[in-house]
């Protein structure tokens, strides 16, 4: 325990040792124990200070009362008798005398008149030095006061108590109080440690359950569950682990599906290429322009798949940054129109564009790729008719929408932007199944999102939302 951390929160000051490599049970138990000791220690100090202050206040109050009463008695005695004698003083102070006080009286010349201390009266003639010895022995606590009547010093006296503990009953009371205090502290400490031990075991058990669950998830298990009665912090960790487990499960399932789809997409052209090339090599199949064209078509399909995979990996890489510059809406739409106008007309589509802003900031190559994928999909799977692009200025940025006739079945919508997901109709056409995944990656690279919806008018709408901070000109 070489290092300590200090944390001040409100009026609470905590000093807790850092124990690296120790179990949660030991750290929690030690933390509770230290906190309990600090609280009990502070309580003991406060209680001791309170008792000490009370005793001190009692001593001051009693001493002041005794001195005041003694002065009044001696003054009344002198006024009555005209002088002070040992016998008169003895009779006058008798009501005040008890074994717990002292009383010393001397005349104006310093001769002892009366001395009482520790339950014993010392007469002046028995031992003349007793008075001076008493004053020397108790010089730190005994103070002589002057009795002055009408400007004449009549006598000097000292009166008071030797302290709260001088009384046997008071001393017994303090002793009993001290014993009770230590017994109470011991019991309180034992109860505190017992509670700390029980709570630490509960916390350690819950922490162990969460740790074992995390280890199981790391080891590949995907059916790990956590109790619902965990403490708040561990419950948060458990919920996060549960969500991570579900996400890992989805991603693993998606990866398996993606691998299977990619293998399927690769297997078909590769098998076709291999079979035809083997037939040509064996002389079974003649070499013709039609056959070479078919082989070339399969090669292009493989090339497109590889390019889509490479592009998606590049955009999704953590270090990838879009190249921002000013994009004019009219210019971007013209580029799309030059690419798709002829195939659109051949399939019965009319491609149009509308915009309410002249330009915005973005990566033109990426956005052209994403919009090309959306337009291409619309031509392949949409209903012939109007195919519209809208560039709209939004409160939080801009949106680019591609709208075409025809809808997509609701069961396919949640999976549209997953890698290699292809609906039944899409599986009968060429493609890698990565087009919409690339669209999503492009939108996210611009700090935005992509959404799809079917409208009540029977149209499909894909919309890219690009964030304001990434699309405004500096």
Image (tube, rainbow, N blue to C red):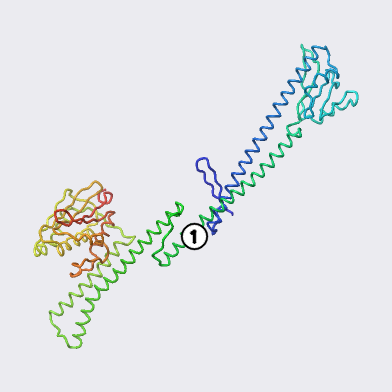
Considering only vertical position in the picture, is 43 above or below 403?
above
Residue position marked by numbered label 1 in the rendering: 208
For the point 63% across and 47% down, the residue is 187
Q: Residues within 10 Å of mark 1 (few under 14, many from 20)?
A: some
Location of residue 129 in the rendering, given as x and y in whole percent from the top left corner: 88, 27
Residues 19 and 113: in front is 113
* Residue 255 picture location, percent across and down: 31, 67
Q: Which residue in the rendered view is the most extreme toward the bottom?
A: 283
For residue 350, which quarter of the picture?
bottom left
User: What is the quadrant of residue 130 in the picture?
Assistant: top right
356 in relation to 152, above or below: below
At x 67%, y 44%, the residue is 182
User: Which residue corresponds to the image point at 31% horizontal and 69% vertical from the top-left?
Assistant: 256
Quadrant in which residue 364 is drawn? bottom left
Residue farthest toward the right in the current orientation of the protein = 126
Total numbered circles:
1
Q: Nearer the viewer, residue 404 or 344?
A: 404
- Quadrant containing the N terminus is bottom right
Where residue 44 sits in the image (x, y, percent)? Answer: 63, 41
Give 27 or 97, whichever is nearer the viewer: 97
Q: Secondary structure at mark 1?
A: helix
In the image, is residue 110 above or below residue 214?
above
Q: Residue at x 54, y 49 (%)?
A: 5
Find residue 238 and report its horizontal and vertical position in percent: 42, 57
Q: Nearer the viewer, residue 165 or 140?
A: 165
62 vs 418, left or right, is right
Q: Is residue 175 left or right of residue 262?
A: right
């Amino acid at each position: 325990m070489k290092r300590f951390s200090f944390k001040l929160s409100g009026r609470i000051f905590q000093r807790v040792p850092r124990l690296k490599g120790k179990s949660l049970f030991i750290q929690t138990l030690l933390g509770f124990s230290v906190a309990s000791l600090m609280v009990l220690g502070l309580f003991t100090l406060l209680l001791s200070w309170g008792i000490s202050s009370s005793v001190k206040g009692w001593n001051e109050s009693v001493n002041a009362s005794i001195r005041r009463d003694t002065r009044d008695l001696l003054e009344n005695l002198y006024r009555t008798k005209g002088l002070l004698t040992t016998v008169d003083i003895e009779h006058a102070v008798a009501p005040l005398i008890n074994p717990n006080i002292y009383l010393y009286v001397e005349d104006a010349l310093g001769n002892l008149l009366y001395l009482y201390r520790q339950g014993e009266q010392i007469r002046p003639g028995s031992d003349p030095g007793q008075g001076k010895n008493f004053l020397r022995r108790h010089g730190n606590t005994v103070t002589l006061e002057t009795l002055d009547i009408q400007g004449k010093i009549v006598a000097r006296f000292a009166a008071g108590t030797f302290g709260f503990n001088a009384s046997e009953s008071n001393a017994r009371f303090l002793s009993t109080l001290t014993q009770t205090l230590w017994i109470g502290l011991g019991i309180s400490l034992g109860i505190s440690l017992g509670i700390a031990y029980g709570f630490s075991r509960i916390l350690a058990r819950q922490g162990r359950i969460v740790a074992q669950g995390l280890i199981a998830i790391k080891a590949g298990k995907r059916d790990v569950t956590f109790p619902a009665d965990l403490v708040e912090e561990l419950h948060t960790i458990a919920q996060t682990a549960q969500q991570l487990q579900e996400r890992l499960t989805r991603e693993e399932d998606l990866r398996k599906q993606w691998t299977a789809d990619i293998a399927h997409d690769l297997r078909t052209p590769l098998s076709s290429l291999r079979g035809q090339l083997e037939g040509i090599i064996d002389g079974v199949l003649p070499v013709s322009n039609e056959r070479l064209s078919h082989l070339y078509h399969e090669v292009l399909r493989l090339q497109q798949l590889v390019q889509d995979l490479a592009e998606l990996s590049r955009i999704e890489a953590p270090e990838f940054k879009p190249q921002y510059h000013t994009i004019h809406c009219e210019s971007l739409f013209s580029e799309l129109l030059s690419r798709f106008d002829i195939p659109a007309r051949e399939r019965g589509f009319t491609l149009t564009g509308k915009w309410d802003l002249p330009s915005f900031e973005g990566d033109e190559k990426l956005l052209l790729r994403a919009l090309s994928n959306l337009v291409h999909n619309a031509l392949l799977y949409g209903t012939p008719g109007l195919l519209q692009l809208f560039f709209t200025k939004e409160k939080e940025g801009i949106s680019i929408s591609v709208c075409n006739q025809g809808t997509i079945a609701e069961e396919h919508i949640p999976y549209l932007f997953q890698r290699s997901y292809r609906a039944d109709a899409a599986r009968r056409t060429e493609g890698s199944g990565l087009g919409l995944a690339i669209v999503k990656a492009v939108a996210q690279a611009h700090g935005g999102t992509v959404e799809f919806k079917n409208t009540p008018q029977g149209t499909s709408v894909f919309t890219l939302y690009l964030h304001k901070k990434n699309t405004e000109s500096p």
